[in-house]
Amino acid sequence: MSLTLDNLKTHTVATILSNWFSKNQRDLPWRETNDPYKIWLSEIILQQTRVAQGTPYYNAFTSRFPTIKNLADATQDEILKLWQGLGYYSRARNLHAASKQVMTEFNGVFPRSYNDIIKLKGVGPYTAAAIASIAYGEETAVVDGNVIRVISRVFGISDDTNLTTTKKHIQHISDDLIKGRKPSEHNQAIMEFGAIQCIPKNPGCDICPISQRCFALKTNQVERLPYKVKKLKRRSRYFHFLIISDGQNTLLEKRGEQGIWAGLYQFPLLETESDKFGPRMLEKAGFPKTNYTLEKSIATRKHVLTHQDIHATFHHFRTNELSDTNFQKVKLDEVHTFALPRLIDRYLESNSI
């Protein structure tokens, strides 16, 4: 069967990607195994996380929890503590939930097909396709941010990539690209190409092996594509953390299961509409009017999250007795053993309590 012009381009691009990958792939620990558990672990860690940041966490998790049963048997606090600093903590909670799901619904054996893998908590189409193709050789094309960028530029996809129709178009091209290829190699090749060659800003088009076939380069749209309409507006939040100490102990509280830092521990928190704070605000946080002396207040640098900026101030109070039962009484030298938001952890690295 003869190739059409479009099929010829996809066939050629796929071949170029394969050749490029064989020469340029990075030496990463999860590429040294076919264990679906470890591949899944790496994919969850690398969601919204750079490889350089995620690799130490991957190594820590595989060392602490070498099997999925080890992960399922751990407590959520253990997992959140090990995840500390990585952000997007719902990933860690979903990771734990999915490990238990494997133990109960799949008899402790990691599911072997895309259709079963996608049933796991926190696993979407991209992650399921990556695991199915890399661990089991299933012909399922991955589409992540790197893939969207490569395909948008090479094949000239100029529509908003937030739209369902655009996503389906890119998926269709991805499905064509993987046909007749080695699924594991192809998917890793196109993701790697987007990660280190066809990067968002100032890609090396002069040394790109696909440059002669790249629509964006020919039409001077490399910096414009992929096109994505920004919808969400940033907001500012003002957090006042109350570090109340009797010289040996302090108080912590556990955040709820919704919102940022869900399930993590923090000092008693009062959120206001500005960075202004007065001693009377202690009453709003549920503390008695007396017996608390404000020693100092230290504002931190703005903590930037995906769609919001946290302006945090830590207020150090001294008291003769910690008797409030609404919070958890903790020894000062044990605070670091709790799973804390990175903002608080960083503060404690340079400030004593």
Image (cartoon, rainbow, N blue to C red):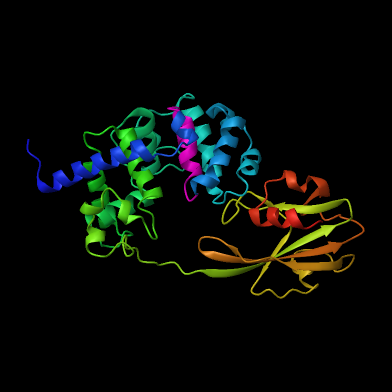
Q: Which region is colored magenta? A: 33-49
Residue appearing at x 51%, y 60% in the figure: 306
Q: Position of residue 270 (x, y in %)?
A: 70, 65
> Residue furthest toward the right?
320
Q: Position of residue 141 (x, y in %)?
A: 30, 40
Q: Quadrant of residue 3?
A: top left
Q: Position of residue 333 (x, y in %)?
A: 82, 46
Residue appearing at x 64%, y 36% in the figure: 75
Between residue 106 and residue 45, name the one nearer to us: 45
Asked if residue 239 is positioned above or below residue 107 in the image, the reply reads below
Residue appearing at x 37%, y 33% in the figure: 134
Q: Is residue 129 visible?
A: no
Quarter of the image where the N terminus is located: top left
> Residue furthest toward the left?
2
Between residue 328 and residue 276, name the one nearer to us: 276
Q: Quadrant of residue 203?
A: bottom left
